[in-house]
Image (spheres, rainbow, N blue to C red):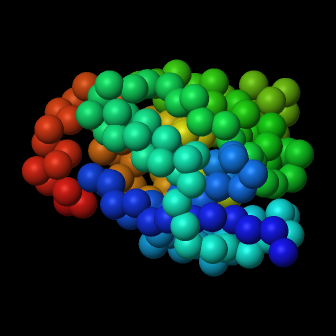
Amino acid sequence: MNQIFFKSYMTPFGDLKLASYNDQLCLCDWVYRKLRSRIDRRLAYGLDAEFVESGTDVIRETIFQLEEYFIAKRQTFTIPLLMVGSPFQQSVWEKLITIPYGKTETYLGLSMQLGNPLAIRAVASANGANAISILIPCHRIVGSKGEMVGYAGGLATKKRLLNLEMGKEKSWELFDNNNS
């Protein structure tokens, strides 16, 4: 059977589960999210693979780049990604990647960019199904009035990620206030 290699990684924002398949990152997601088992099942089914705990070069490079991101020394990622989902979900995730560091977009704005302003709920659902948090920056999606709405890592984490990107949270404070 094919194998998805995974490793846990403790960040200043909480625990992530990182996984790679065929030298591509297929998972960078919050360990304690509500849909954890559903996301894992989707990956295992979609890749016809089983999870095996082990590090890989892709996982090590992801950790390195995330650590640079957490100290505000990286704004983009160069990790090869493997997005496992429907063609519509993948189109939403591709659009998420284009949202610049430190900027936000609304569900409606994302729907309009995809050419279907009536697809707001479908876009929100695809956003919630994102298995590659931070690198596919679903945390940059906000409500129509700029309010914090749904995030797999929790709204406090979403706010902290956005504050980091906007220079409102100092990187050294992240390590003093780990998981606060």
Residue 104 vs 156, above or below: the answer is above
For the point 63% across and 74% down, the residue is 52
Q: Is residue 95 left or right of residue 60?
A: right
Task: State which quadrant residue 105 falls in.
Answer: top right
Q: Nearer the viewer, residue 65 or 144?
A: 65
- Residue that lies at the very extreme toward the right in this rendered image: 87
Residue 117 shows in the view: no
Quadrant where the C terminus is found in the figure: bottom left
Query: Disc count in the image?
Result: 0
Q: Is residue 129 left or right of residue 46?
A: left
Q: Position of residue 173 (x, y in %)?
A: 13, 42
Residue drawn where x is 43% and y is 24% of the image: 75
Establish if 126 lies above or below 118: below
Residue 47 placement (x, y as % from top left): 83, 63
| Front residue (pair 12, 167) | 12
Residue 92 in sight: yes
Quarter where residue 170 is shown: top left
Up/down of 18 relative to 37, above or below: above
Q: Position of residue 140 (x, y in %)?
A: 50, 37
Tell me the residue at 84%/33% (across/down). 116
- Of residues 48 and 167, the one nearer the viewer is 48
Q: Is residue 144 left or right of residue 89?
A: left
Residue at 20% across / 35% down in the picture?
171
Classify the position of the N terminus by image quarter. bottom right
Image location of residue 34, percent across then percent down: 54, 74
